[in-house]
Image (tube, grey):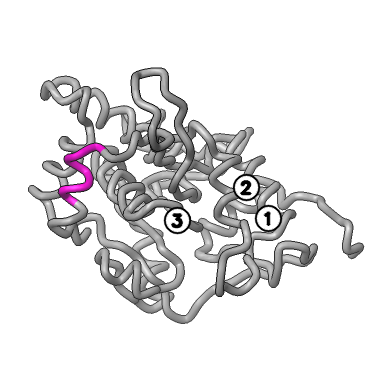
Amino acid sequence: MSRHDTSIIPPELLLQAYRAGIFPMSDSRDDPEVYWVEPRMRAILPLDGFHLSHSLARTLRRGRFRVTCNEAFDAVIDACAAPRVDAEDSWISLRIAESYRELHRHGHAHSIECWQKIPGQDGPDAPEVLVGGLYGVGFDRVFCGESMFSRASDASKVALAWLVAALRRAGAELLDCQFSTPHLASLGAVEITQARYLDLLQDALWPGSGLQAGGESSAGAPAGAAVVGATGCLPTGFAALLVDAAAAGLSSSPGNFIAQSLTHTS
């Protein structure tokens, strides 16, 4: 394969891989090769086991960030793949990034973004900058987190808190973190064997689900779940959280609603 080969991984192949419990990586940003990973130990974050610290709850309630879903997918994946101080070269190669952009266009890759106003500029029309976020792959009742980034204190933690709340709201069952890190462990992630992960994965798929044209996977879903099957749990649950926050009189401070929902279930 040429070093300049930028052919994407087809969306249907990516989804087949995730349904089989494997995922792609590269050795560097410029590496055209892709290898498929099936780790012996897998990190997951139980959706009822998210560790909401007092300081993170306070950050959510204060609304330091405006949080969105799928508003800036390209910017999030670029930030996740960007070089970092004292870090190894990113495994998110140009080819992998383009593959997830295509998967996003098919409705199965999603992002959460944290925005903050530029210091010294106030008012409803003050410009915002992207300061944190995450992206991953969603299908059936599964979300596979790929990467996150933070340019402001607690930004990635806030994005993860919204992710957990949205997945819970949509009835998801499995949040895959792939590899354990001290950061993820502090938020509730645990390690399990790959065999156990595959069991949980199978349980979280809709019965008889299969890939349809365009990469959708709602076949076999119970009544009322077709929208979740087609778009993934994250955007469905995120939108529902905003509706719930408005119904609770917290439309202007949805972060407070997220903190309450996680406090009651953590």
Q: Mark 3 points at which residue?
A: 145
95 relative to 1, above or below = above
Q: Quadrant of the C terminus?
A: bottom left
Nearest the camera: 261 or 116? Answer: 116
The span from disc 2 to disc 3 (Cα, nearest Å) is 12 Å
**Magenta region: which residues?**
57-63
Nearest the camera: 254 or 221? Answer: 254
Q: Mark 2 points at which residue?
A: 100
For the residue labelled by badge 2, is the local secondary structure a helix, a strand or a loop? helix
Residue lying at the far bottom in this picture: please name it.
40
Q: Quadrant of residue 249?
A: top left
Q: Name the residue under label 1.
A: 96
Q: Main secondary structure of the magenta part?
A: helix
Image coordinates of residue 142 in percent, x first then y, are 39, 51
Amino acid at dot 1: Ile
The span from disc 2 to disc 1 (Cα, nearest Å) is 6 Å
Q: Residue at x 16, y 59 (%)?
A: 53
For residue 4, side relative to residue 211 (left or right): right
Residue lying at the far right in this picture: please name it.
2
165 relative to 151, above or below = above
235 relative to 197, above or below = above
